[in-house]
Image (cartoon, rainbow, N blue to C red):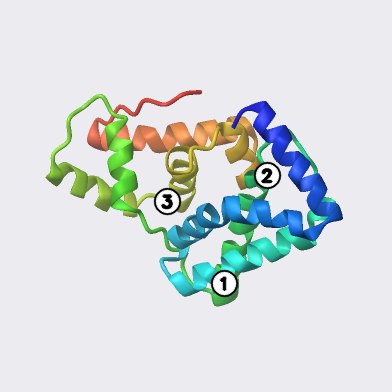
Amino acid sequence: MSEAEIRQENEIVERSRKDIRAFGELYEKYFDRIYYYILRQTDDEEIAGDLCSQTFVNALNHLPKYEYRGLPFSAWLYRIAGNEVNKYYRKKKVTKVFSIEEIKVRELVERSDDTWDEDLIRKLLEFMKDLPTDMLQVLELRFFEDKDFKEIAYILEMTESGAKMRTYRALDKLRKNFHIKVKYDE
């Protein structure tokens, strides 16, 4: 998003503080993105729906505490959603799931300089399933959700340099195992 779009969005946030109906614009804009973000981490539509609803309820309830930091409002929603997912897994005491959508991996491969055949894509999908959760999170946010490093740092509650380092490490694993050269912007 451009700085002008972020500021315009912040105006909607400010209106929402005074008139709860204005929050509907933000809900409509971000519901699907947040839902699918959660779904990839739960692989369960019902749980994703519940956690997504809880994310927006929490956002609305804590809107008076929201601080504009020059980031899109969605960064705050992703952070809340991530916290809801983590809280769910802590409460259930089960291992976190990451569902990797084949279409998203194909989009990542398309950013590569190399040509990929179906067998190699299948192997890449299998390999990615075994990556540590922290690496999958940064890859998902960077390449599947198109977040910049500043947003990733905010969402995952780390420094911007930490977000870059974690992303580069994940990409290095892909490069070493698959010789993938992903093109991405700073």
Q: Look at mark 1 in the image and give the residue it sits on.
A: 50
Mark 1 Cα shell of 10 Å, populated few (<14), some (14-19), many (≥20): few
Rendering coords of residue 149 (x, y %): 57, 32
**Distance from Cα at disc 3 to Cα at disc 2:** 28 Å
Q: Amino acid at mark 1?
A: Asp
**Distance from Cα at disc 2 to Cα at disc 1:** 21 Å
Answer with left or right where residue 137 lies relative to residue 7: left
| Quarter assignment of residue 115 | top left
Rendering coords of residue 20 (x, y %): 79, 59
> Disc 3 or 1, which lies upstream in sequence?
1
The residue at 68%/44% (across/down) is 73
Which tag is nearer the camera, tag 3 or tag 1?
1
> Element under label 3?
loop
Q: Look at mark 3 in the image and give the residue it sits on.
A: 132
The residue at 51%/52% (across/down) is 33
Out of 37 and 19, give the one closest to the viewer.
19
**Residue 73: mark:** 2
Report if the CB atoms under discs 2 and 1 are less than 8 Å apart. no
> Disc 2 or 1, which lies upstream in sequence?
1
Rendering coords of residue 9 (x, y %): 70, 40
Q: Amino acid at mark 2?
A: Phe
Rendering coords of residue 40 (x, y %): 43, 58
